[in-house]
Amino acid sequence: MIHVDNLVRRYGETTAVAGISFEIPAREVVGFLGPNGAGKTTTLKVLTGFLLPSSGTVKVAGLDASTDPLGCRRSIGYLPENNPLYEDLEVAEYLEWCAAARGLESAKARSAVKSAIERCALGAVIGKDIGQLSKGFRQRVGLAAAILHDPPILLLDEPTSGLDPNQAAEVRALITELKKEKTVLYSSHILSEVKASCDRVLIIHRGQIVAQGSPAELEARSTGAQRLELVLAEESKAREAADFIRAVEGVESAEPRAAGGEAAVTIMTRAEAGDLRAKIFALAAEKRWPVLELYREGATLEDVFRSLTA
Amino acid sequence: MKGFKALFLKETRAYFNTPTAYIIAVVFLFCTGYFSAQPMFVLGQASVSGFLDLVPLLLTFFVPAITMRLFSEEQKAGTIELLQTLPVEDHEIVLSKYAAAVTLLWSLLALTLGFPVALGILGNLDWGATLVGYAGLALAAAMLAAVGLFASAMTRNQVVAFIVGWAGSFALYALGKVDALVPPWLSPFTDFMGLDAHIHGMARGVIDTRDLIYFASFGGVFLFLTLVRLWVSRTD
């Protein structure tokens, strides 16, 4: 659905996007991750045709952006960063205008506006000026405008930024609902959100893609040292447990610490050791330690993100 | 074309659904009325030549006041991104905004037709020359609107857009007034570049292709520059 080949975009001397290539098949939801200034927004702006690439090719819905920019724009619904809207139009007026400007027939436009209003739960504010809306409603108006013409592709630039947790959850729910029928590429720096709703993640740093894959793949990729937490019911056992665990092969370090009547041992494993949970559990069983918990604080998407973009 | 229509209607509504158009209309009618009624009472003449003389100067202020928001506002609010990601061509964006500004300007000029009508009732007015003169004003207004639109596209600051638009318009106006000040070899040039000669020609009731070419080519150049500016903003 989206095909980017060796895309470069410069602003004067600075290179915002330095030759990235990726492909997004139909009906995949892809999270676009990266620190601020990594080139996410620039990439999205090039995909929408708002910016032209310095070099490289962009294909959207099978159309070449350089030869058929209008066709590309027709198949894209776009929510720009910071969600600019015409503040002095009423919600319904704005959506009707979007439909008209996109050339929808008036009957089709009416039903499109109606269904966008329903989908984004804007019924309560249709007669209000956009300038008076709360941030959550504004965001929904932006989303409504993006899905209005029923595009096969949605490009959303930080759709949940600046929203409170409830509003963000609503927006995520809407994206999850849309993912059954649309190809979605959205940028974010909220990792938990991306993990929850994306099939695949692209991590971009300094204008280049540094990693891509499903959230699980990326987490597995960081096969470095793991951190295990062993929680015991008796504070007094912590030191003893730590000493024994240190002797286990593959353990780098084991630090006991006491917390609120419980004892915990933080175990760092060596990178090549693999999963040591079974071994540690066997040891605990043998020594009859009162184990409350044993868990791996395995590499999270966040660790991967940090290690790649730090 | 559908895109053009929707954009044009939105721009027109932005003028006429807000106080902008009405405030401008009141002030414009006041200025033109005050100055054009004077020759009638002082000189006892039924002529619109004083009016036709004055309006170009007024236009150098009113036109940029009307055009200053067209692109600056969109650039400042970021809504230009909405416009430029719609499936419409850049020239439709430029022309829809331009057409809306010209619609407002021509409406203002049409409102002033009350003065010649009053003169026509009171005295013996040359209607042919008056109407050709009005056509000249309408063309001059449309030309200056292109200058103002370009100024608006160059900045996100409306005040800057106004001042630059005014300076450009006033330069064209002033060039027509410096005949006596420049060396004789330069005067054909200033004459052609300035608004004055072209408006005066038409105010005498003469339709000269050179005047039409002047208005059309200057207007066209600035519309084209605006279009280039939009294109550059995509590549910059």
Image (spheres, rainbow, N blue to C red):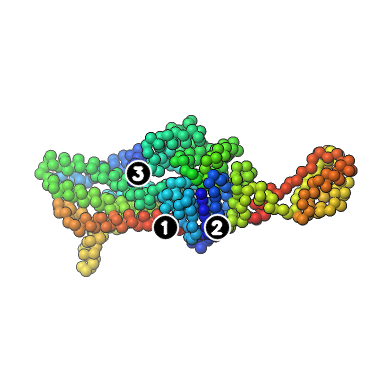
Going by the image, does A226 lie left or right of B155?
Answer: right
Chain on which label 3 sits: B
Q: Are marks 3 and 1 on the same chain?
A: yes
Q: Residue A95, can we see it?
A: yes
| Amino acid type, callout 2 | Ile
Q: Position of residue A176 (x, y in %)?
A: 57, 39
Q: Are marks 2 and 3 on the same chain?
A: no
Q: Between tags 3 and 1, which lies in front?
A: 3
Marks 3 and 1, the one that precedes in the sequence: 3
Q: Residue at x 55, y 56 (%)?
A: A21
CA neighbours of label 2 inside 10 A, class few (<14), some (14 to 19), many (20+): some
Q: Could you say which disc has been placed on residue B172 in the image?
A: none
Chain on which label 2 sits: A
* Nearer-the-camera pick, B22 or A276: A276
* Nearer-the-camera pick, B130 or B48: B130
Q: Position of residue A211 (x, y in %)?
A: 62, 54
Going by the image, does B177 lie left or right of A70?
Answer: left
Occupied quadrant, residue B195: bottom left
Q: Residue at x 77, y 52 (%)?
A: A274
Q: Could you say which disc has been placed on residue A20 in the image?
A: 2
Q: Mark 3 points at which residue?
A: B2
- C-alpha gap between disc 2 and disc 3: 36 Å
| Amino acid type, callout 1 | Val
* Nearer-the-camera pick, A38 or A156: A156
CA neighbours of label 3 inside 10 A, class few (<14), some (14 to 19), many (20+): some
Q: Do labels 1 and 2 share a chain?
A: no
Q: Residue B178, can we see it?
A: no
Q: Mark 1 points at which residue?
A: B232
| Amino acid type, callout 3 | Lys
